[in-house]
Image (cartoon, rainbow, N blue to C red):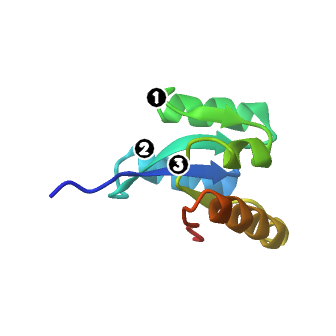
Amino acid sequence: MSHKIVKLGIVGAGIIGKKHIENFAENKIAGAKITAVCDLNIDNRTWANNVLDGIVSLFDNFDDMLSSDIDAVLIATPHYYHPDMVVKATSMFWLKSQWVCIL
């Protein structure tokens, strides 16, 4: 039986986000792959693109990433941004009839 691979967008490619990105790049997480990265810092986006072999969409705007072709979002920003981002992600995925992954 074939399982669907979850297309994951990650927001925040700083200290914690980099650890998550490295784990996905090393195939330590089964059933999902990062297909989009959002970070305000171009150096973090460039780093993520290189680590993920250039097969991701890059964003500097969270709303734009949420509107892209992703199934779930991993929020790896400073904790004080989480509530607003969770609300936005939940609203967007509800409209897309998809689901939200909160890690």
Q: Amino acid at mark 3?
A: Ile
Mark 2–mark 1 CB contact (< 8 Å): yes
Instruction: Specify which label sits upstream in the sequence, 2 or 1.
Output: 2
Residue behind mark 1: 53
Tell me the quadrant of the picture where the C terminus can be found.
bottom right
Image position of 89 with respect to 14: above or below? below
Quadrant of residue 88 in the image? bottom right
Residue behind mark 2: 25
Q: Secondary structure at mark 3?
A: helix
Tell me the quadrant of the picture where the N terminus can be found.
bottom left
Q: Amino acid at mark 1?
A: Asp
Q: Amino acid at mark 2?
A: Ala
Q: Secondary structure at mark 2?
A: helix
Residue at image x 54%, y 62%?
98
The location of residue 44, given as percent across then percent down, is 70, 38
Depth check: 42 or 84 in front? 84
Residue at image x 37%, y 46%?
26
Q: Is residue 64 left or right of residue 21?
A: right
Quadrant of residue 41 in the image? top right
The location of residue 19, given as percent across then percent down, is 55, 55
Mark 2–mark 3 CB contact (< 8 Å): yes
Residue at image x 60%, y 71%?
102
Q: CA distance from mark 2 to mark 1?
A: 8 Å
Residue behind mark 3: 21
Badge 1: how crowded within 10 Å, few (<14), some, or many (20+)? few
Mark 1–mark 3 CB contact (< 8 Å): no
Q: Is residue 52 left or right of residue 81?
A: left
Depth check: 99 or 22 in front? 99
Most extreme residue toward the left is 1
The location of residue 33, given as percent across then percent down, is 43, 48
Q: CA distance from mark 1 to mark 3?
A: 11 Å
